[in-house]
Image (cartoon, rainbow, N blue to C red):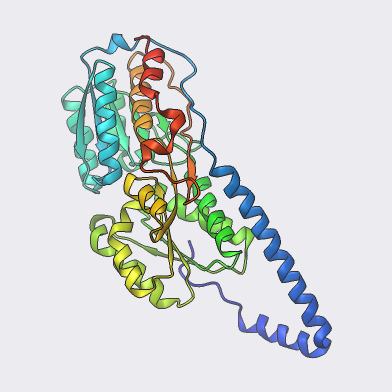
Amino acid sequence: MLNKKQLFGPVALACAALALAACGSSGSSTASSGDAASTSECATTAKAVVAKTTADPALVMPATSFDMAKNQGKTLWVIDILTNQFIQSYNTAFSEGAAAAGMQAKIFDGKGSVAEWNTGIRQAISQKAAGIALVGIDGATVAESVKAAKAAGIPVVDVLSGDPTAPLPDGVAAHVTQSYTENGAHLANYALADTGCKLDMGILYTPDVKVWDLLGKGAEAESKKLCPSCPVESATVNLANIATDAGRSAGTLLTQNPDMNYIFATGESFIPFMEPQVKQARPSVKIMGHDGLDAAVKEIKDGGMQVATVGFPTAWTAWLTVDNLGRLIQGLPANDVVIPNQLIDKSNAKDSNTAQFPNFADYKAEYAKVWKQ
């Protein structure tokens, strides 16, 4: 990602000055007309994407059913990347889904440390887990532990750790995920539409978390494609010290660029820690996030500094993970469901993540049908 503001170089500026001197007002008028046309095309494209992605997603479910009761009494392990608001919501729903499937859930907090992630997997193996879910963890970063689980006959799925088309790391049986690169592009379109393609965007991300990196790259690429002259800057946040580093990084972006009008926090958990500093430094700046946490959806609805996010049905996703592990334990193929999502702004924001996805309201009953219960 870019680490410096995109600026016209001195050579380009000199050429532009010569052109104006040679051609007079006629040349100036032509350039202005071209810029206006380009900006208009950018805004039209961005608005069309926003209109499409703010619609309520339809319920999707695995296409084939199976007898989940055969897994009665087994234990599923969840190895979390760290503990934050999203992870807590996911874990609660996963535990409920496991119980509904007749199994138990064991939650392990990875504390943002590769060493802890490996420890969790090794403990799951030693305690004879029936299946392991890696939440937010790229299987390639814990490759040897994942291979050990495979050798022990324990299926491993990675959850929300990359794009659905990414190759499966050795030992990982399935992805449970969505397209983060595409979601980043959707948020860039929102900001472009909102600013009339006069976007000056800062991106906060953590290179150690693959999905946050993908979100940032997706947003940057889309902004550069539709509006090449729109500046994009990025800054990193220390995964192990989000509480203090998010505010520091946001403050640095704003200090370095007095024209910045949007900050995209690729980790929505950054926002509570950075928002006070952003509000103090430049209250006109708008914030975007990703995940659609309860607090984020409510703030968007209430007109706070966060104006947009991409969210997805968190509880349904946790049960989708249980579904995949249940199939793999029995030697069945993984389901191939890609998690649907929605661009959320003030026009469609509701009171919570659950309320945001009305078509998923009866997901428990739908999974019961799929599991032949």
Image point (45%, 68%), residue name: 3
To which quarter of the image does residue 243 belong?
bottom left
Res. 130 in view: no
Q: Is residue 65 visible?
A: yes
Query: 141 or 174, which is in the foreground?
Result: 174
Q: Is residue 70 above or below residue 202?
A: above
**For this rendering, which residue is in front, 169 or 257?**
257
176 left or right of 259?
left
Numbered label tally? 0
Q: Residue furthest front?
A: 302
Q: Is residue 223 above or below residue 107?
A: below
Q: What residue lies at 48% left-to-right and 69% top-to-bottom?
A: 261
In the displayed structure, 209 sits above or below 117; it is below
Image quadrant of residue 157?
A: top left
In the rendering, at what x and y percent does residue 42 appear?
66, 59
Residue 257 placed where, x, y %?
45, 76
Q: Position of residue 268 (x, y in %)?
A: 35, 52
Of the 4 image quadrants, the one containing the C terminus is top left
The extreme bottom residue here reads 21
Q: Residue at x 35, y 68 (%)?
A: 278
Q: Nearer the viewer, residue 114 or 223?
A: 223
Q: Percent x, y for residue 130?
A: 25, 20
Q: Quadrant of residue 203?
A: bottom left
